[in-house]
Amino acid sequence: MGYTAIVIAAGLSSRMDGLKPLLPIGEKPAITRLLDTIRAAGIEDVVVVTGHEREMVEEALTEQRDGSFYVQNRTQKEPSLCSVYNEDFRSGMFSSVKAGLRCVAETSDALLFPVDVPLVSAKTIRGLVSAYEEGSPSRFAVPVYKGNNGHPLLIPRLFYTEILGHKGEGGLKEVRNRHAAEMLRYEVGDEGCVLDMDTPEDYEKLLSYYGRKTDA
């Protein structure tokens, strides 16, 4: 079974003082740290959805330590890191989710990563995938930390058509809620899967968490 990671890095970062994908966490920008984690979890096929300040985000992608695996199209068959530009990014995150899903092969399930949740662990990603495969591989799956849903959200290919065709309010959350009773909620001890960077205060909390883990 194949998986494609969709990293949403298109938002306006309106409540932050800087561009979220490029905010530093230790010695790396957030997007680089997240991509390193995704690859460490064994996911080699990655679509980064860009929008606001796309040139700056794409430049960061080319600076990956293995920059040769970055491509700007989806014509090749081998797993790759590519970017897709969402022209409609100002309308909200759901348009970026759709832009990413359109780039995923019909034979691949998707793992959805907002770039502002960059400290989820590779262990959590691997565990989520394993739990999904051991159960019924036809339902949404999400890691849960102390009762709170985290990221990534695993989206089975079964739901691509329903998501892409949804034009009502609520976006992805509305589609997901239709199937909430069947959702796999995978309990983890990884606080990083729920820490985001929506506000400067959130960012400081995330940096504090990163510092504690680094010092441990």
Image (cartoon, rainbow, N blue to C red):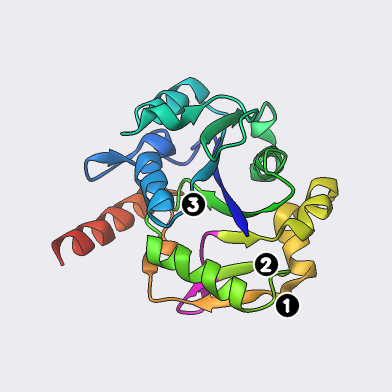
Element carrying mark 1:
helix
Residue appearing at x 53%, y 42% in the figure = 46
Picture coordinates of residue 190 (x, y %)?
38, 70
* 138 within the magenta span: no
From mark 3 to mark 2, how far is it between C-alphas? 18 Å
Residue identifier under label 1:
182
Quarter occupied by residue 124 = bottom left
Element carrying mark 3:
loop
Residue identifier under label 2:
140
Q: Is 89 placed above or below 204 here?
A: above
Mark 3 vs 2: CB contact within 8 A = no
Viewer-closest of 69 and 24: 69
Residue identifier under label 3:
43
Viewer-side label of 3, 2: 3
Viewer-side label of 1, 3: 3
Picture coordinates of residue 115 (x, y %)?
47, 45
Query: Dot 1 surroundings within 10 Å: few (below 14), some, or many (20 or more)?
Result: some
Query: Dot 3 surroundings within 10 Å: few (below 14), some, or many (20 or more)?
Result: many
Residue 83 seen in render:
yes
From mark 1 to mark 2, how far is it between C-alphas? 8 Å
Residue appearing at x 49%, y 46% in the figure = 44
Residue 149 seen in render:
no
- Marked residue nearer the N-terminal end (1 or 3): 3
* 149 within the magenta span: yes
Viewer-closest of 41 and 114: 41
